[in-house]
Amino acid sequence: MNLIIQGKAIDEADLESIGKLAGSSRIERIGAGACRLKNAAFSEAIPPLCESANLDWAFVPESRKLSDFGLVVMDMDSTLITIECIDEIADMLGIKPLVAAITEAAMRGEIDFSESLRRRVALLSGLEQSALDRVYAERLELSPGAEKMLEKLKSTGIKTLLVSGGFTFFTDRLKAHLGLDFTASNTLEVVNGKLTGRVLGDIVDAQGKADWLNRIRNELNLSKEQVIAIGDGANDLKMLGEAGIGIAYHAKPVVREKATYAFNHSGLDGLINLFPD
């Protein structure tokens, strides 16, 4: 097995200690803040050592290549982008703490997502649609490493699906800006330039995300093992479960526990460090 160690900075002493614990035969630098330890074996002492050093770790079969995959599925809010869009929209009305509290409860899995979304959107009733433009232009930022990851996926021929419990207003713009292949999300009802406080059509919830993953996977004639999914909240668990590899990105504990790999300190480009070309 290869052991991938990555983070913002890797101390040589920590790396040496991890290598000894893993019985690694060789350490390869694979980029800024990332190393590959060859012929490594798991030790119970590795996770706590990495956590204390602010490093992510992942045991990856040596035979796995990035080109083995055909689809990467991503959540949007707090995954591909750094913000929760609905919280920032709510800030335009001065009710961000109220809406953010519901968002956090839903991400922890304490509230059914569809119910939480309806409750949050209802609080936005009467807001001018132009507020969404302001959120996109002034507050939306890509997560660290996002563009590098997407560039590599595109050059490798891997398709991308952005599937979100958020809104088409944002996913459509990100699709055009980033050259994503597929997007799926929820549509806010707007009448006379104002939000009505309602969502149109079926809500893209946890099951909806999993269904979209499988729909696109089938369209591309891929197996489950050829799909990678990335998310951060409880609403992403079913989607991650339908992928060959699930990555918890700066995620809630319930997601980290069930994912294949967890990126707690790395950017999204940590994905391409896992697998050689």
Image: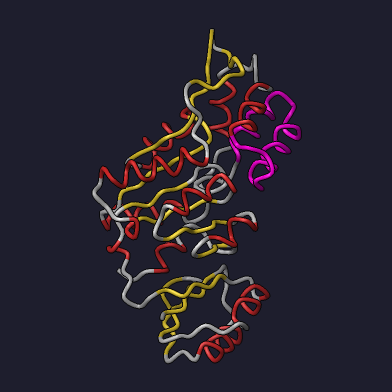
Q: In which quadrant of the rendered image does the N terminus lie? A: bottom left
How many numbered circles does the render carry?
0
| Main SS, magenta residues | helix
Q: Residue at x 60, y 42 (%)?
A: 83
Q: Residue at x 51, y 29 (%)?
A: 203
Q: Which residues are magenta?
A: 84-113
100 or 1, which is in the foreground?
A: 1
147 or 24, which is in the foreground?
A: 24
- The reply to whether the magenta stretch includes residue 106 is yes
- The reply to whether the magenta stretch includes residue 47 is no
Q: How is the image coloured?
A: secondary structure
Please say if 232 is above or below 18: above
Q: In which quadrant of the rendered image does the C terminus lie? A: bottom left
182 or 119, which is in the foreground?
A: 119
Q: In the image, residue 117 lies at what x, y percent?
A: 61, 31
Q: Is residue 16 left or right of residue 28?
A: right
Q: In the image, residue 205 lies at what x, y percent?
A: 52, 37
Q: Residue at x 42, y 73 (%)?
A: 60
Q: In the image, residue 101 lies at what x, y percent?
A: 73, 38
Q: In the image, residue 48 lies at what x, y percent?
A: 65, 77
Q: Residue furthest top?
A: 192
241 or 55, which is in the foreground?
A: 241
Q: Is residue 150 left or right of residue 52?
A: left
Please say if 226 is above or below 172: below
Q: Is residue 176 left or right of residue 104?
A: left
Quarter holding residue 245:
bottom left
Q: Residue at x 53, y 32 (%)?
A: 137
Please say if 17 is above or below 191: below
Quarter holding residue 255:
bottom right
